[in-house]
Image (tube, rainbow, N blue to C red):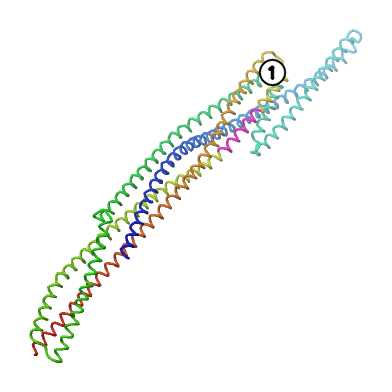
Amino acid sequence: MLITELENEISQLKSTRDGLEEEGHSLKRRVEEQRGHLLSSQQSLLAQQNELEQAHQRHEQSRENYDRLIHAKDEEIGRLQQEVDHLGHTHSSQEQEVVILQQEDKTQSSLNNGENDNEKHDLSKVEINRLVKGIKEKETEISQLNEKNLNLTRQLAQLVVSREEIGKLSQMLLQKDLEIQALHARVSLGGHSQDVMFLQQQLQAYAVEREQVLAVLNEKTRENSQLRGDYQRIMDIVAGKEAVLLKVQQENQRLSTMSDPSGSQEMFRETIQNLSRIIREKDIEIDALTQKCQTLVSVLQAGDSGGVSSNQFEELLQDRDTLKQQARPDTEANVAVANVAEANVAEANVAEANVAEANVDADNDCTSTLSVDYSRLIHSYEQKERKLGSLSHELAHVQQTISQLSSTKDVLLGKLDSVAQSPQVTPLSAALTSTAQRNQEGLRQELESLRALLSERETMIRTLQENNHRLCNSAQVSDSEQRGQAEEARQVRERLDVLQRSVREKDLLIKTKGDQLTQVCVCVCVCVCVC
């Protein structure tokens, strides 16, 4: 029964081993598939990293441009304030001159009135009318300048308040640009040249921003190539780990063959059969010795009651010698079998310990390496997702800035159309408008392409995470199956230990029976001597 059970267990172990081999092949195929998915996902991650870096650099450059623009606007506002103050002083001096002229006219008219009333009456009247008109014009001009001064004061106060509002900084800057351009048109004699210059500056700003976007794209491309190199290095490490795992599996098979020198289960079955046969032979010898002991005891009892003949004693001595000679090779064979069994058990234990240690080391190394790699990849994926979110926010901010700039451009162009008088300004504004529209359309297309690329990268990242989870689950299942196989091997080893203990017990029983037979022979000899 025990041999049958062992054979059944051996067949079960073989089937389990075949299943494990099939599972190993399936795991290899899955690893190859995961490698392909990892390659594609790494490429997408590299592209997303490039886009993130580009957006970050573009954001920094936009902030620097805004700071420079604010500083320039502050300087221009101060200069305009100085011009307004200068105009105020100029108008005050003109008012004083008008008053002096009026007084002089009055005195002169009073002096000349007595001398030439008739001749200069018409001339003084015309002069007075001219002076009155000039005074009215000066007064209207002074009132206009005062209104402008008040408007400028209010605008300066609004600008100071708007500096404290960081969220509305861009919009307020655009409004102040419009107001400053209007003041330039009213104060200076240049007319519409400053509006044209402003449009040219806006176009230059668009061109600079586009150059910055291209620089960010180049930087992201460089980082993409670097990440590809890192991914290739990781794949080389994974290939090295797979080679180490294959080597460990080969070492495991070699240790298994060392634990079973014949390399087959037939030798193991034959050894078990030999042990069973030896046990049966020992049982037969024990029964024979028991019968002989009983015969000797009966002979001794008969000798005590009625005496024993010398022939019977000689037969008993011959039987004792014969039994000793028969027991000696059996004892030696038993000792040799026990030594061989102990040596085999020790070798099997050492081989199984080596195999278990190698399996544990291989499993620990592979599992720890794979878990570390997967955790690192998952962590990097999460970081990339967070960076993608921040990139989307930055892209939205950039798009808002572009829309604000386009609205500013439309306002400026509308103002140019409303105040344009010379035929040379219209073609220039039309050319600037078309150039700005083309630049804006190019920027919009680039933003759309970036959004599409971001969505593709997010989809690939999610797919890669799912594949990683499946691979981790497969590794856990393989570990559980290997533990089950180790448990079955341990049970087989325990059964072998039980068989070896039974053999040793039989040997002890044989030795005990031999000692009893020796004691009986000694008693017989003593009785013979006494008789």
Instruction: State the residue at coordinates (32%, 61%).
Output: 6
Vertical relation: 254 (above or below) 133: below
Confirm whether the magenta stretch covers residue 320. Answer: no
* Location of residue 357 (image quadrant): bottom left
Vertical relation: 260 (above or below) 123: below
Can you give x and y, in whole percent of width and height, for residue 54 in the image?
A: 52, 33
Would residue 130 appear left or right of 329 to someone viewing this image?
A: right
Would residue 361 appear left or right of 310 to someone viewing this image?
A: right
Categorize mark 1 by other alpha carbons within 10 Å: few (<14), some (14-19), many (20+). few
Can you give x and y, in whole percent of width and height, for residue 96 in the image?
A: 78, 23
Can you give x and y, in whole percent of width and height, for residue 296 in the image?
A: 16, 83
Q: Where does the C terminus fall, quadrant-wise?
A: bottom left
Can you give x and y, in whole percent of width and height, for residue 312 in the image?
A: 10, 84
Look at mark 1 in the image and give the residue it sits on: 189
* Location of residue 421 (image quadrant): top right
Q: Which residues are magenta?
A: 391-406
* Location of residue 119 (image quadrant): top right
Furthest-right residue in this view = 118
The kind of secondary structure the magenta stretch mainly shows is helix
In this rendered view, identify the residue nearer to me: 343 or 236.
343
Helix, strand or loop for disc 1: loop
Instruction: State the residue at coordinates (40%, 55%).
Output: 481
Which residue type carries mark 1? Leu
